[in-house]
Image (spheres, helix red, strand yellow):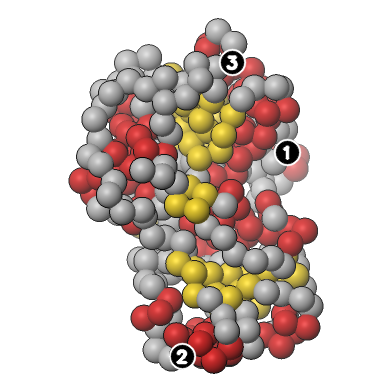
């Protein structure tokens, strides 16, 4: 069986954010701009949009004129749907010849009028969130190679960025490492991966095993985490990914300014220690040696004068390296990871 879902779309691309108000629901587009900036010509936003990726604002005609070949839906609402008010502009883009790429639960061809528009414009409709057929049930069998997983105190708190930055750091140190994408944005960035939250529940652990198969003893799979163990809506995918990945190590990702689960304000955010303890307790089912090797903070909205003390406090509380992957980089966490692996 092929172990990953390959995704091919043609750059340059423009990112469509629709009219979403919060960056939490624009992480796909923001991630693409962060990691594939040279291939992005701009963003298409509707009135009321509260997300700005810092690239030129364009309409469909402007995107085509700028050389875009693909329009990527970079936003989502809870549940992974597409509001009806977005469909007309997506159809305009398809009629103009732009391929449409989405990583949502709804299939593009099911949106009213979009398939005929794509046919008229010679455009492709590309759904990223489609798992490969024939996935197995998880076995729990110990696999060769080494694995590190990112976990979070909540959704959208830096698990993807942390995994990408850690894989980059390991490679810079001459360590064999592969970023393993598990969500639509990561798959779009890497060109391959497993849309783990679209897998039928019984096969999630098996899908994680397929994603990170046997490998050389000194090779690291850096696996992008999904959901959160304390999340009332999405913890099920987190548990399956954790057990199926059987990670040797994990990094906890956290937004230090967040107090409650995003979108579920009645649920307070867990502490880092709670997340570490629960991850170890569940992860020991398939890897008794699982250990936490660091904390990754998203400090993008923390005042500069407060960053140092905040990072130092979290490092002191956990006794682990604590960094912002996009500021300090992942060097300290990589060193902790490799020190415990005998590398």
**Nearer to me, 224 or 117:** 117
Q: Is residue 65 above or below residue 235?
A: below
Residue located at (28% from left, 23% from top) = 141
Residue located at (50% from left, 16% from top) = 217
User: Percent x, y for residue 133?
Assistant: 31, 54
Q: Is residue 130 above or below residue 213?
A: below
Q: Mark 3 Cα within 10 Å, few/some/many (few <14, many 20+)?
A: some
Q: Mark 2 Cα within 10 Å, few/some/many (few <14, many 20+)?
A: some
In the picture provided, is 46 more to the left or to the right than 4? Answer: right
Can residue 185 be seen from the camera position used here?
A: no
Q: CA distance from mark 1 to mark 2?
A: 46 Å
Chain-order first, disc 3 or disc 2: 2
Determine which residue is flagged by label 2.
Answer: 116
User: Percent x, y for residue 210?
Assistant: 37, 38
The residue at the far top in this view is 342
**Of discs 1 and 2, which sits in the foreground?**
2
Residue located at (64% from left, 43% from top) = 299
> Badges 3 and 2: C-beta atoms under 8 Å apart?
no
The local secondary structure at tag 2 comes to: helix
The residue at the far front in this view is 1
Q: Which mark is residue 338?
A: 3
Determine which residue is flagged by label 1.
Answer: 327
Chain-order first, disc 1 or disc 2: 2
Can residue 250 be seen from the camera position used here?
A: yes
Q: CA distance from mark 1 to mark 3?
A: 21 Å
Q: Which mark is residue 293?
A: none
Q: CA distance from mark 3 to mark 2?
A: 53 Å
Residue located at (71% from left, 88% from top) = 61
In the picture provided, is 116 more to the left or to the right than 142? Answer: right
Quarter holding residue 82: bottom left
Query: Is the C terminus in the top left, top right, bottom left or bottom right quadrant?
Result: top right
Quarter holding residue 295: top right
């Amino acid at each position: 069986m092929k172990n990953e879902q390959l995704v091919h779309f043609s750059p340059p691309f423009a990112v469509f954010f629709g009219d979403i108000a919060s960056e939490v629901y624009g992480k796909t587009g923001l991630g693409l701009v962060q990691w594939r900036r040279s291939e992005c010509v701009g963003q298409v936003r509707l009135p009321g949009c509260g997300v700005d990726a810092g690239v030129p604002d364009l309409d469909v005609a402007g995107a085509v004129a700028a050389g875009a070949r693909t329009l990527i839906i970079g936003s989502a609402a809870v549940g992974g749907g597409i509001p009806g008010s977005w469909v007309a502009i997506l159809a305009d883009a398809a009629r103009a010849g732009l391929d449409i790429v989405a990583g949502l639960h709804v299939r593009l061809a099911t949106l009213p009028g979009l398939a005929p528009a794509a046919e008229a414009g010679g455009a492709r409709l590309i759904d990223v969130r489609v798992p490969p057929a024939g996935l197995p049930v998880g076995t729990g069998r110990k696999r060769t190679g080494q694995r590190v997983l990112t976990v979070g105190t909540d959704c959208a708190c830096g698990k993807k960025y942390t995994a990408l930055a850690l894989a980059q750091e390991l490679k810079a140190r001459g360590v064999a490492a592969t970023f393993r994408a598990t969500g639509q944005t990561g798959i779009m960035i890497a060109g391959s991966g497993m849309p783990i939250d679209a897998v039928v529940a019984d096969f999630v652990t098996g899908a994680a095993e397929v994603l990170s198969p046997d490998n050389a003893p000194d090779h690291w799979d850096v696996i992008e985490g999904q959901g959160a163990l304390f999340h009332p809506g999405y913890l099920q995918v987190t548990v399956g990914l954790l057990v199926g990945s059987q990670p040797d190590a994990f990094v906890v990702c956290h937004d230090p300014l967040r107090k409650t689960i995003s979108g579920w304000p009645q649920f307070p955010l867990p502490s880092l220690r709670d997340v570490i303890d629960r991850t170890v307790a569940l992860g020991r089912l398939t890897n008794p040696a699982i250990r936490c090797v660091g904390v990754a903070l998203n400090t993008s909205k923390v005042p500069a004068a407060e960053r140092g003390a905040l990072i130092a406090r979290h490092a002191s509380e956990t006794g682990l390296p604590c960094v912002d992957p996009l500021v300090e980089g992942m060097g300290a966490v990589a060193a902790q990871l490799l020190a415990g692996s005998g590398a």
